Amino acid sequence: MSYTALIPTGIESLDNIIEGGLMTGKVYEVCGPSGSGKTQLCLTISTHIANCYKQQVHYIDTKADFSGMRVEEMLTSCGYLDEVIGAVMERIRVTRIGNIYELFNLLHHFKSNVHSEQDELQSVRIIILDSLPILFFPFLGKNLNDGFGLMNQLANVIKHIVTECHVAFVIVNLAMQWIEEEHSTNEGHSGYLPQEEVVFTCDTVKPALGKYWLDVPCTRLYIHKIDSREKRQLFIMKSTILTTKKYCRVSVNSQGIMSA
């Protein structure tokens, strides 16, 4: 327990529903439809930890869309000077990878250096993987069995890292919203839910990667739009340590994601 810590995300309403922040030694997943704000959430968390706690963040980018300009915009909007902005961006270590095998090489580096680089790793409290499904797309269809084996291996490596390195691991995943046929005409293509509508169940939401991945994260958060602009809702879909069905509302602006 002496190595365990709660890392606040910097988003007050989110920290409230996850009881203080991200816990080291745990695997978290953020899932949601395309364009729902998953990457914005990761950038906000990364910037907050690198700025407020002066700790390194390992950001694994599989889509080549990590935006240093967006991080700079967040900090500038909060009134920080160039010197602070530069220091924060140096603490966010971005690694771009193109396939699952490059991811394994990177994770095995973390795993093998947990003791030889302990001083360095102690300053790392969070690893963010944005995003995972794209790495498994080549294994759909005839290569599906190979994908299951790699998925199982990946889960074991990630769980070893969070335990040995005492970090929180955040994984970005896609999710699909299944809508009843009679509602599809009116709601199926809207891309968002009316602001007054609050979803208390996620029975119609299915995370990507299938049933073999469902139990890997300790906590799964679902993010979706609740209007056509900046409003979002975060919902605890599943957790082994938190009360499920809690939710909060946030908004996306120049400072990142903030409590609504």
Image: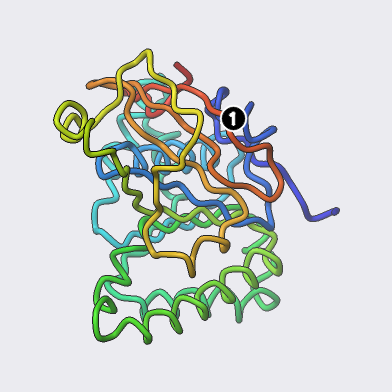
Give coordinates of residue 30: x percent, y percent: 45, 47
Tell me where residue 172 appears, x and y as whole percent.
41, 53
Q: How many labels does the image show?
A: 1
The quadrant in which residue 157 appears is bottom right
Is 150 placed left or right of 161 in the picture? left
- Quarter of the picture holding the N terminus: bottom right
Relative vertical location of residue 176 with respect to residue 147 in this rendering, above or below: above
Question: Disc 1 designates what residue?
Answer: 246
Residue at 29 percent across and 50 percent down: it is 66
- Nearer the observer, 33 or 184: 184
**Three-letter amino acid code of the residue under disc 1:** Lys
Give the residue displayed 69% in from the left and 50% down from the top: 240
| Picture layout, residue 29 above or below residue 17 | below
Residue 222 appears in view: yes
Q: Nearer the viewer, residue 99 or 119?
A: 99
Above or below for 144 versus 30: below
| Residue found farthest to the front | 182
In the rendered image, residue 27, in percent from the top left (x then y), is placed at 59, 57
Residue 105 appears in the figure: no
Position above or below: 73 against 162:
above
As drawn, the residue found furthest toward the right would be 2
In the depicted view, which residue is nearer to us: 205 or 109?
Answer: 205
Q: In the image, what residue occupies the spot 70% across and 76% down?
A: 115
Picture quarter containing residue 83? top left
Image-based side of 155 in relation to 24, left or right: left
Which residue is at the front of the view, 33 or 84?
33
Q: Which residue is drawn at 55% across and 52% down?
A: 28
**Image-based side of 121 in relation to 172, left or right:** right
- Say which quarter of the image contains residue 82: top left
Q: Residues within 10 Å of mark 1 (few under 14, many from 20)?
A: some
**Which of the image's four quarters has the C terminus?**
top left
Q: What element carries label 1?
A: loop
